[in-house]
Image: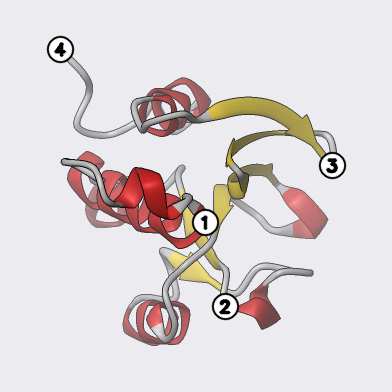
Amino acid sequence: MTARHPDPADPLPWLREICLSLPEVTEKVSHGWPSWFVRRMFVSYAEHHHGHPHLAFWCAAPPGVQAELVAEDPARFFRPAYVGHRGWLGVVLDGTGADAPDRDEITEIVTDAWRCVAPARLLDRPGG
């Protein structure tokens, strides 16, 4: 059984499992961090990247989602360096208590990121 919340000290295995559950995803190191690709990168792990105080990931996001989530909950979501101007979303993984990430929510965010970059042939199949 998978954990509802990641280990705040090591959320990488939890994020990896979610990413690799999607069709045709591969994992590579990009810019020094584990990243997941389907045609292009859609999620990148960010361990205290550029002074950010949290373990997090950056991901592609549908238009408007970054602004909405950051405004709604800036303790859990942020505009990441370098890719934030393109609408990518930063998601904190080491929160605890009320700020602890929820597996269903993270799975939905990661799946939406996958859909942003996946080829149409994958989106057209059941579950895509």
Q: Nearer the viewer, mark 3 or mark 4?
A: 3
For the point 23% across and 56% down, the residue is 98
Measured as percent of width and height from the top left, residue 79 is found at 60, 74
Sequence order check, earlier mark of 1 and 2: 2
> Within the image, what quadrant is residue 38 found in?
top right
For residue 87, which numbered disc appears in the image?
2
Sequence order check, earlier mark of 3 and 1: 3
For residue 54, which numbered disc appears in the image?
none
| Left-right relation of 125 to 72 | left
For residue 31, which numbered disc appears in the image?
3
Secondary structure of the residue carrying numbered label 2: loop
For residue 1, which numbered disc appears in the image?
4
Secondary structure of the residue carrying numbered label 1: helix
Q: What amino acid is found at the position of numbered circle 4 in the picture?
A: Met
- Measured in 3D between alpha carbons, the distance from the residue under mark 1 to the one under mark 2, in whole angstroms, is 13 Å
| Left-right relation of 28 to 69 | right
